[in-house]
């Protein structure tokens, strides 16, 4: 509880910093044209800050839920394929449906849910967790190959450039409409996940024991898979793929909650929001005159962390 | 509560069998490796899918922390929680914290000394006692335990079997898979002998542990210095 409060309080300065980044420019614009400054804040900064909070929370929460479900600290939403499915769906929508905001978002979610549908069909209704992971890895590989196929068949160099940049993951130049699209979906799916905390704690004792304690493990598994998939689809569709937050955040949080997987859900959501907001502030520091892509930064920080986990688990 | 299994089967591991198990007794489940002990225990716990039905006092089994506790032989724990936090989970998902019940269960399993330790720092035998405390904490009507004394030292084996007798005395039903036939003879009211997925003997320990059964099923006989190959 105190941890949640501390993390929530941490979000306030981070959100303010993200929203009012580069205050000199903001003040200069406001002095010349107050209406423009207001537009800039509402239509450029607010969506960016809002999306960083919402998508960061969804990544942290999705990772914590997936690790709890699979009882594996090296699992993350990417493992089960919805991230790749969402990328593929968004790439296809970008090419064939004109690349509008709504088309890409719809394509992303359709792709995530299609990947999940395939997963359900492959693993079967009574799937063991190991089957689920193997099927997820296969689907991820297939989705990744199809994304690359799509890239190599790009109709024009500009389309290729657009899609590649979007795949790198970024929150720059997003609209209020995109925030209004992603936020409710992530809020509902996130609420569903947060409600599974007690069942996830029981699952720490193993699937059989959880079942005898009255947890419907099959229902819990599909609830988490579908909620995480929907959330991932919405997030990827708006921001591209942002890796490693979902893997790293639950690791940072779990020791602070006595390593209980259910108790890690809320703090993972809050810490994910804080970490992605901080990362999105960091990418605005210009490198070589360019803004770094958010997905590149999170991978640069996250991948070594992942390697450290592997070495420690060996 | 009386536990009744009707035409219970898990092909190909377990041939159909019907059983009525009375509360207040310790029932031992014995048989060589691969005889189907774990399969039968899991089926009695309502786990897995297969033909047959389980009832408690005539009503279909509803799994809950109060109705039955299943203790697998597997001692792995996914997350390095504190022992007392792990035992608390035995009260069921979302149950209110009950430090008194947790402390009592840990003490019963002689695991009170490591209540505040992380389970990944415990030895296999210590972890086994913590997991047993987890099974006991909700005072379930039925305890279904797969080799609860494996990995335990001799004193703790006797201690845990005495604990199971005390659980039966408070009215719980206890079914326990055992490999130690001397312990089974000394601690159980009734023995079920499984061989190749079939129930081949059922009764008081002396009626089940006959020289013929021991030779046919376990390929051992009582020798002058303990068990000897038959």
Image: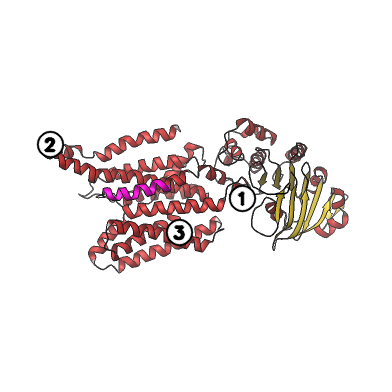
Identify the colour scheme used. secondary structure
| Disc 1 residue crowd, few under 14, some 14–19, many 20+, Cα 10 Å | some
- Residue A215 x %, y %: 58, 47
Whether residues under marks 3 and 2 lie with C-beta atoms below 8 angstroms apart, the answer is no
Question: What is the residue that sits farthest to the left in this orientation?
Answer: A32
Q: Identify the disc placed on residue A31.
A: 2
Q: Is residue A228 magenta?
A: no
Q: Say whether residue B225 is visible.
A: no
Task: Please indicate whether residue A269 sits to the left or right of residue A221 in the image.
Answer: left
Instruction: Write down the residue under mark 1.
Output: A208
First along the sequence among labels 3 and 2? 2
Q: Are marks 3 and 2 on the same chain?
A: yes
Give the extent of the magenta segment.
Answer: A175-189
User: Disc 3: which chain?
Assistant: A
Task: Please indicate whether residue A66 sits to the left or right of residue B133 in the image.
Answer: left
Q: Nearer the viewer, mark 1 or mark 3?
A: 3
**Label 2: element kind:** helix
Q: Identify the disc placed on residue A116.
A: 3
């Amino acid at each position: 509880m105190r941890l949640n409060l501390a993390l929530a309080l941490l979000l306030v300065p981070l959100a303010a910093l993200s929203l009012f980044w580069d205050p000199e420019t903001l003040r200069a614009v406001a002095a010349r044209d107050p209406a423009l400054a207001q537009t800039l804040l509402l239509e450029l900064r607010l969506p960016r800050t809002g999306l960083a909070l919402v998508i960061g929370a969804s990544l942290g929460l999705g990772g914590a839920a997936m690790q709890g479900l699979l009882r594996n600290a090296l699992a993350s939403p990417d493992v089960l394929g919805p991230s790749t499915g969402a990328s593929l769906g968004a790439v296809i929508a970008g090419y064939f449906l004109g690349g509008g905001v709504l088309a890409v978002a719809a394509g992303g979610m359709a792709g995530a849910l299609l990947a999940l549908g395939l997963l359900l069909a492959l693993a079967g209704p009574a799937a063991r967790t190991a089957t689920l992971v193997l099927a997820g890895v296969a689907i991820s590989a297939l989705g990744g190959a199809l994304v690359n196929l799509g890239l190599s068949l790009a109709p024009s160099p500009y389309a290729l450039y657009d899609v590649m940049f979007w795949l790198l993951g970024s929150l720059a130049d997003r609209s209020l409409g995109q925030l209004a699209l992603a936020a409710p979906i992530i809020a509902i799916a996130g609420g569903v996940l947060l409600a599974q905390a007690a069942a996830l704690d029981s699952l720490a004792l193993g699937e059989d024991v959880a079942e005898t304690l009255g947890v419907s493990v099959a229902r819990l598994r599909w609830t988490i898979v579908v909620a995480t998939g929907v959330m991932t689809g919405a997030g990827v569709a708006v921001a591209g793929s942002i890796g490693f937050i979902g893997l790293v955040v639950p690791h940072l949080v779990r020791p602070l909650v006595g390593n209980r997987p259910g108790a890690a859900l809320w703090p993972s959501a809050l810490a994910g929001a804080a970490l992605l907001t901080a990362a999105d502030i960091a990418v605005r520091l210009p490198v070589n005159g360019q803004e770094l892509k958010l997905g590149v930064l999170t991978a640069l920080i996250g991948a070594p962390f992942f390697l450290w986990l592997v070495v420690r688990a060996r | 509560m009386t536990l009744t299994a009707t035409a219970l089967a898990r092909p190909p591991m377990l041939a159909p069998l019907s059983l009525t198990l009375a509360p207040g007794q310790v029932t031992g489940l014995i048989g060589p490796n691969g005889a189907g002990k774990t399969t039968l225990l899991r089926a009695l716990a309502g786990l897995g899918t297969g033909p047959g039905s389980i009832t408690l006092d005539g009503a279909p089994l509803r799994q809950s922390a109060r109705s039955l506790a299943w203790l697998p032989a597997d001692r792995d724990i996914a997350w390095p929680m504190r022992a007392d936090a792990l035992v608390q989970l035995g009260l069921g998902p979302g149950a209110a914290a009950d430090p008194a019940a947790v402390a009592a269960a840990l003490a019963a399993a002689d695991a009170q000394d490591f209540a505040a330790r992380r389970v990944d720092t415990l030895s296999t035998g210590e972890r086994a006692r913590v997991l047993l405390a987890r099974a006991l904490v909700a005072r379930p009507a039925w305890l279904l335990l797969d080799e609860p004394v494996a990995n335990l030292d001799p004193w703790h084996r006797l201690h845990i079997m005495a604990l199971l007798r005390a659980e039966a005395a408070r009215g719980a039903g206890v079914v326990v898979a055992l490999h130690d036939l001397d312990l089974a003879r000394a601690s159980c009211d009734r023995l079920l002998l499984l061989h190749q997925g079939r129930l081949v003997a059922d009764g008081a320990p002396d009626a089940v542990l006959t020289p013929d059964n021991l030779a046919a099923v376990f390929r051992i006989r009582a020798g002058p210095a303990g068990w000897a190959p038959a």
